[in-house]
Amino acid sequence: MILDLHTHSIKSDDGRAKVRNYCQWIRTREVPIDGFVLTEHRQFDDESDYSALAAEFGLTILKGSEVETEYGHVLVFGVTAGLTSALDFADIRLPLARVIDACEAHGAVPVPCHPGRPRVGMHAHLAEYGVPAGVRIVEVYNGGSRDREDEIAQAMAREQGYLGIGGSDAHIVSHIGRCATRFPAAIGSEAELVEALRAGEFEAITNREQAA
């Protein structure tokens, strides 16, 4: 099963894609993914129910979040009510250690995203803050990466022994599925996604040419 683990809809302040339009694009353009995770900026969208859309288009649609820390942006999978109470997702200077500890306490998985990107990526802050404890997974393929950003992320992952995921970081419809993550078994819920990520059962892939 292939999931795009990093997407944004109009729920994000800079997102320009409606979730239905993502689904339509995937099906009409035959984008090689089975679903996607909506990781809206600085929030968890608890109010939206995409189950009808998922059934209509035969896709898995899950939700997560993208928060901001002193090490850059971090995807959070498996968000629960307890986690949203423990963390202020709108805080743009969340301590990464606190995010990692809260995720561990509430059954979620934190993943630094586009870590090779200047300013908002983890690699840019290693010289100042050092290698953070508790990181297990980073995003090594990002559909919005430029220049050598993915290469930097992949080199960091090799050096630190991190596992790697892929996500499009789509903010517009045509970018969905540019990068994704392959899982050996079907995933139909946030809990199953967390289980697979914790088990290390996944592989980052890129579909840049097909999704262009």
Image: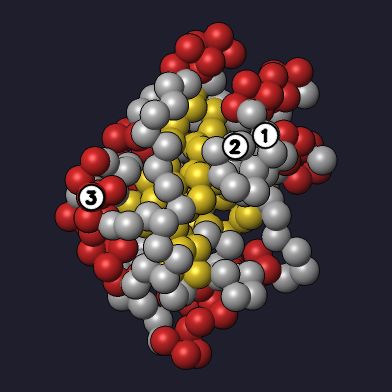
Q: Determine the secondary structure under disc 2.
A: loop
* Mark 2: few/some/many CA within 10 Å (<14, 14-19, 20+): many
Reading the image, the residue beneath label 2 is 9
Rendered image: mark on residue 87: none
Q: Is residue 177 visible?
A: no
Rendered location of residue 212, percent (x, y): 82, 40
Between 2 and 88, the one nearer to me in the picture: 88
Cα distance between the residues tagged 3 and 2 = 23 Å
Which amino acid type is marked by label 1? Answer: Ala
Mark 1, secondary structure of its residue: loop
Counting from the top left corner in percent of width and height, residue 29 is at 77, 24
User: Which quarter of the picture shows residue 174?
Assistant: top right
Q: In this view, does 117 lie to the left or right of 139?
A: right
Where does residue 85 sit, x and y in percent of width and height? Answer: 23, 50
Q: Name the residue under label 3.
A: 85
Q: Are the two marked residues, 3 and 2, in contact with CB atoms closer than 8 angstroms?
A: no
Q: Which of marks 2 and 1 is nearer the N terminus?
A: 2
Q: Vertically, is 106 above or below 31?
A: below
Left or right of 167? Residue 178 is right
**Residue 14 location, x and y as percent?**
65, 48
- CB within 8 Å, label 2 to label 1: yes
Pointer 1: what residue? Answer: 17
Count of numbered labels shown in the rendering: 3
Q: Which residue is painted at 54% across and 33% down in the image?
A: 36
The residue drawn where x is 24% and y is 41% is 81
